[in-house]
Amino acid sequence: MTVLTAKQASDALSSICAALSDVGIIQDIGVSALSRIAGELKGFGNSHTWNYEVDRGLPILFSETVDTNKNPIVPKVVAEMVAVDQSDGVLTAFDALCVAIEFDHVYDNRPTPRWHLDMANQKEPGNWQPGPMTHLQYGGHLHGDRTLDCFLKTPRWCHPPMEVGLLCEIVAANFYEAEWNELREMPNWNTAICTLQKICLHDYATRLASTLNQSSKSFLHTMWAQDWADEAAS
């Protein structure tokens, strides 16, 4: 496992915030949200464990843009919980993870498209929710009315964990092409993104690589939460 300190994560998020602001694709409320997280992480100092949340009331809010049909939308990143634990013997670098990209329609109340990344739930000690340990799900809802949630919660797509910095990169790359082309040439941006990739991708990439030279388990089987946990316990 590649071990980072909370201060390193704080510095990375501060750089990401500054870069997004420099190219003009993040609103003031989004700057405030990222700055708050960076400040909280800085308080953890050189600790290898930290946590934060991004409430829907103060999201990482991007500038208005349009979807493929030219309808105005506002992307945002929220996090119910990001808890990093890089102690020896842990399953992954994340003790808890539930982050999402949401898109509000600007001029109507259609259900909000939403993609969230999280970890399988441990129902009880040793008993894990079916699905990959870290996964991506689609779901949309109209704020305040969960009866309009997407009726289907599966499939849970096998996906590496991502914290809010990497989700900001996803939003920039997909919805602000000109600014994304500018961002990816910025040394500070690349350093920050690559720093956060270390805690997000190391465990996932290691398990992926282990499947390529054997035929007893598929990649998906290897990533299945119950099997991942059982292997770690053995």
Image (tube, grey):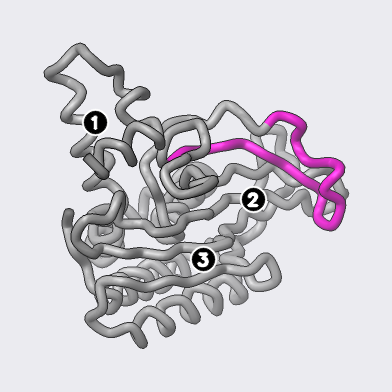
Instruction: Say what secondary structure mark 1 lies in.
Output: helix
Q: Quadrant of the N terminus?
A: bottom left
Q: Which residue is mark 3?
A: 24
Give the labeled residue for mark 2: 102
Residue beneath disc 1: 208
Q: How many marks?
A: 3
Residue 147 is labelled as none
Q: Nearer the viewer, residue 85 or 227?
A: 227
Residue 49 position within the rendered picture, expressed as x and y whole percent measured from the top left: 31, 71
Amino acid type at mark 1: Leu
From the image, state whether disc 3 or disc 1 is nearer to you: 1
Q: Are marks 2 and 3 in contact (CB under 8 Å)?
A: no
Mark 1: give few (<14), some (14-19) or many (20+) Cα within 10 Å: some
Outermost residue, bottom direction? 43
Q: Nearest to the eye among marks 2 and 3: give it.
A: 2
> What quarter of the picture does the C terminus occupy?
top left
- The verdict on residue 139 being magenta is yes
> Tag 2's secondary structure?
strand
Three-letter code, disc 3: Gly
Alpha-carbon distance for marks 2 and 1?
Answer: 28 Å
Question: Front-most of 212 and 217?
Answer: 217
| Residue type highlighted by circle 2 | Glu
Give the mark, 2 or 1, whose residue is nearer the N terminus.
2
Real-space Cα distance between discs 3 and 1?
Answer: 37 Å
Q: Which contiguous range is marked in magenta?
A: 134-152
